[in-house]
Amino acid sequence: MALLEWDRLACRRGQRLLFHDLSATFSGGEIIRIAGPNGVGKSTLLSAVAGLAPLEAGTIRFQGRAITDADDAWRAALLYLGHSLAAHELLTPRENLRFLVTLLGQRPALAAIDAALAEVGLAAQRRLPLRLLSAGQRRRVGLARLFFASERPVWLLDEPLTALDQSFVGILTARIEAHARKGGVVLLTTHQEAPFATPPRTLDLTLFRPQQERAA
Amino acid sequence: MSLAAWRQASEAKMRSPKSWWRFAAPKEFFWLTGKLAPWFAGAALLLFLIGGYAAFFLAPSDFRQGEVYRIIYIHVPAAWLSMICYLAMAFWGIVGLTLNTRVSFLMAHALAPTGALWCFVALWTGALWGKPTWGTYWAWDARMTSQLLLLFLYLGYIALVRAIEEPRRADRAGAILAIVGSINVPIIYFSVQWWNTLHQGASVSLTKAPTMATVMVVTMLIMTLAVWSYSIAVVLWRARALVLLREAHADWARREALRRLGGSEKG
Amino acid sequence: MISFFLAVVTREWVLAWRSRADLMVALTFFVLVATLFPFGVGSDEALLRRIAPGILWVTALLSVLLTLPRLFEHDWRDGTLEQLLLSAEPAPLWLAAKLLAHWLVSAVPLALLAPLLALLYDVESIVLVMLPVTLFLGTPMLTLIGAVGAALILGVRSGAVLLALLVLPLFVPVLIFGADAVDSARQGLPVAGHLALLAGGTLAAAALAPWGCLAALRLAVES
């Protein structure tokens, strides 16, 4: 059974219809790369799937059940990493990660937080305020959340590889592949080439752009 | 029935060609308001003529205030309409938020300038009435002060909706503001009334209408209906313009807009 | 649930402490404006004593207004708000935590500082007591109503000025009852009714404002 189904999704930004009639099914174990040039609506699509932005039309089904507005079960099943850091520059990586993981509904021990930070190479900086860290280091704080999200089957990652060094790109793709192997679904947008063992399935959003037809 | 289920049922009704709900669609709404507005405009004209005649020539002069009191025949209806428009705005905001219909929000946007106008008229006529009658343009009496605060609520709504570029967000933010404001309007009114009774110096009370002869009551009623009809006509016309603007991506809207601007349908 | 609530409150406090210079701005504003008025109306003691409750209430109210944009601006900008909205924990819980933390950090200092400023106006001792009491009871309502406004203007141009227009008319009832409670106490009149109204108003606002606030926050996150 498909884990996630999209049935004729459409999204609008202002007056402009970004995409429509977007239907797809995703099974556990898949990694999907959403492709398309800037402005085509990749981020909007992920936001809409996460329930943060409104869908102009269409239904999303998770495990066979259509999700509604304010769907607690759906929210508990997904992890959304947006463009922004979701981290405050006055807090340390430790404080930021701990809060973010609390938002995921967990009460992590300090050791677990520190272990995750070590995995993303922030062990030495874990007690420095974020404003002293580089852009790449700050991004890695948010990515450290992935180590606490294995219980959430659906991962929506918007440009997760931005500002990362090659070594961390490798760690990230390994983590994503591990999640997929356990039965999760990972949808990500990226401009960069990621060293996945098997190339991920591509969903080209430009195929769902409206032709320059006017509505009747 | 849950909200989602009810909303789905309503959306089905909106698509059915026989139901009243179909007027929630912009194109149908545009057609309906086009048919209705002229009637209200005509009624308004007629009522203003009758009411104006009655106000100036038929209603007797007040033995204390002379002729000046006649200004209440526009002051009171204006005050009432300013309140009614705000409640209507909140109503359409609620409808829009629950049913997710664009047209409802456009009705709310259309109501705001008219409501603000009547606030303004009520304030000015109140001042013009106050000066010859009680010697002051502005006395901090309960009704006028509440009226002033209501004007600020209108201006806030208009400013918020204009400041937000994304139309969906502007619609809904306005609706939230209108709903919060409408809950506060009675609170503001009663607190100001209470405040007024404490700090009242000379007994200036624009709320105390002179005991009214039947002619006065009827005239007041006619003028209120006139102001109401006018407001409906103007709001419907404004809503139509907003619909054309909002639906500019649709063929039918472009045709209508071009027709009104005197252009020809571009091939 | 409680540990989540505390986690949010703690984070807000830590952030407030680490940016404490910003908080001083509102307090300084409060002090400055309160000292400004005598320059405008003259230093006649009887006059100052009479207008002190109103002046100090208005000034406190404006100071609260100044702090409102801080509530959600940063979280909205850095993406924390999205994560809060996606969180499995009930939204009113973290919202209440944020508002409580904000009130404790921004409004309570004003209430505590007010009696000191009231001394500048040579007020009676009853005013020195009633002023902080009414501010304690009234500022939660200001924070709750103000939060709805702050959420509505996130990312909107000229947001802070617009916030004043949106929220000040709604503040008027609180101002009326708060200032009058102090004034009535000064005149030896009963104030139980005023205080009950302020407390009741805060409870009502606590019940209703979160709806508007969350709806506005979800809207802000969409764009």
Image: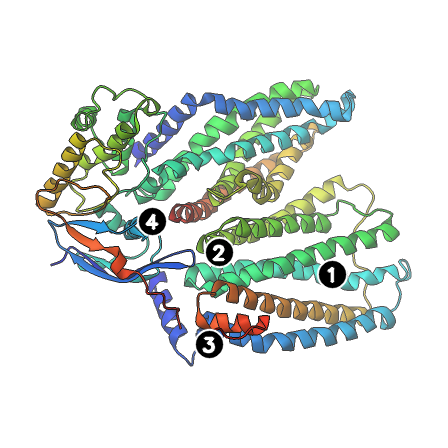
Q: Position of residue C125 (x, y in %)?
A: 66, 20
Q: Amino acid at mark 4?
A: Leu
- The Cα–Cα distance between marks 1 and 2, rounded to whole angstroms, is 31 Å
Name the chain under label 2.
Answer: B
The foreground one among B67 and A117 is A117
Q: Where does residue C90 sit, x and y in percent of width and height?
A: 33, 43
Q: Secondary structure at mark 2?
A: helix
- Residue lying at 49% horizontally and 63% vertically, measured from the top left: B246
The mark closer to the camera, 3 or 1, is 3
Q: Earlier in the sequence, mark 2 or mark 3?
A: 3
The numbered mark, 3 or 1, whose residue comes first in the sequence reads 3
Image marks 3 and 4: residues in contact by CB distance under 8 Å? no
- Dot 3: few (<14), some (14–19), or many (≥20) neighbours within 10 Å? few
Distance CA(mark 2)–CA(mark 3): 23 Å
Question: Quick check: can you spot residue B186?
Answer: no
Tell me the distance, in whole angstroms, between the alpha carbons under discs 4 and 1.
46 Å
Where does label 1 land, which residue? Answer: B76
Q: Which residue is mark 3?
A: B20
Question: As displayed, is residue B245 above or below residue B45?
Answer: above
Residue bearing the label numbered 4:
A52
Point out which mark residue B171 bears: 2
Check if mark 3 and mark 4 are on a common chain.
no
